[in-house]
């Protein structure tokens, strides 16, 4: 089995020592702010949220140009902001994969960056998949966020303590982002992902081993994915 860890950005990820990962990893969205601090980067990077990409385009460009990760899965909207990205053959676009008749992304009615990273990992050939930081228990509206006319949210000041993420300045003053919709979007997309996984295993006759490592008290994806205590990870 080819092994990979998908690192969501939930609070439970704060229990994880990143140096323990001796195999491939996939990181998400604004976690690059933490990676910069510890001088550690995942094997692959995923962010399919076009609002987050637009708000942080310069940092995401640096990840690509400086080859911090091997492969990237992004929203195709980034091309409008960074046309030169089309010169990079290690960048994939979620919307194009979704429209391809031969790609399992087409069966994703709902998605978020975490579940998209999971399906992407299957496409890349990983069959032993560990999940971390997929908490799905968002505080939907932070005190430090203001609602914008288009329905997005803007951080008015960097939170001193952010209940949604594994480091407090994951979101910083000026950041614009979507309402998380943890139950309707994130959790539902993981349910959809497990249906796709079951189908892939039957059709390809390939066993895909998926384990979610999380705290018992967190309302995570344990309802649809085998979950073990974080302490069991070695």
Image (cartoon, helix red, strand yellow):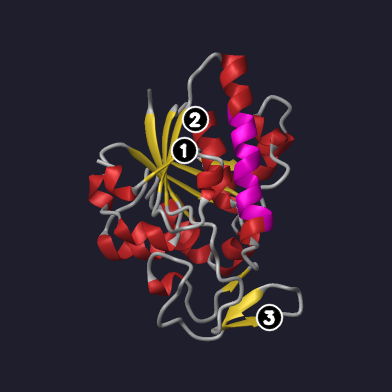
Q: Is residue 141 magenta?
A: no
Mark 3 or 1: the one toward you: 1
Rendered location of residue 162, percent (x, y): 45, 75
Residue denoted by label 2: 124
Which quadrant, please, contains the C terminus? top left
**Marks 3 and 2, the one that precedes in the sequence:** 2
Q: Spot the residue most to the front.
A: 217
Q: Pointer 3: what residue?
A: 147
The label on residue 171 is none
Q: Residues within 10 Å of mark 2 (few under 14, many from 20)?
A: few
Residue 152 percent location from the top left of the image: 68, 72
Q: Quadrant of residue 198?
A: top right
Q: CA distance from mark 3 to mark 1?
A: 36 Å
Report the side of 74 relative to 5 (left or right). Answer: right
Residue at point 69%, 43% (across, down): 95
| Residue 187 image offset from top left, x and y in percent | 61, 51
Circles 3 and 2: CB atoms closer than 8 Å: no
User: As displayed, is residue 160 above or below residue 134?
Assistant: below
Residues in magenta?
184-197
């Amino acid at each position: 089995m080819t092994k990979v860890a998908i690192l969501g950005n939930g609070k439970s990820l704060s229990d994880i020592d990143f140096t323990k990962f001796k195999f491939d990893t996939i990181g998400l969205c604004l976690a690059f702010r933490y990676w910069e601090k510890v001088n550690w980067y995942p094997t692959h990077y995923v962010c399919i949220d076009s609002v987050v990409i637009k708000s942080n385009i310069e940092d995401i460009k640096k990840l690509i140009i400086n080859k911090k990760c091997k492969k990237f899965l992004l929203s195709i909207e980034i091309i409008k902001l960074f046309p030169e990205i089309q010169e990079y053959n290690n960048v994939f676009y979620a919307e194009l994969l979704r429209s391809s008749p031969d790609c399992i992304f087409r069966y994703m009615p709902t998605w978020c960056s975490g579940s998209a990273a999971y399906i992407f990992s299957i496409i890349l050939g990983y069959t032993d998949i560990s999940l971390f930081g997929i908490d799905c228990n968002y505080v939907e509206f932070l005190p430090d966020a203001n609602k914008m006319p288009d329905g997005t949210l803007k951080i008015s000041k960097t939170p001193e303590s952010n209940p949604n993420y594994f480091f407090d300045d994951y979101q910083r003053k000026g950041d614009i982002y979507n309402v998380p919709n943890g139950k309707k979007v994130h959790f539902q997309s993981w349910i959809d992902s497990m249906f796709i996984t079951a189908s892939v295993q039957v059709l390809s006759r390939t066993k895909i081993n998926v384990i979610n490592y999380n705290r018992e008290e967190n309302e995570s994806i344990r309802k649809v994915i085998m979950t073990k205590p974080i302490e069991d990870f070695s």
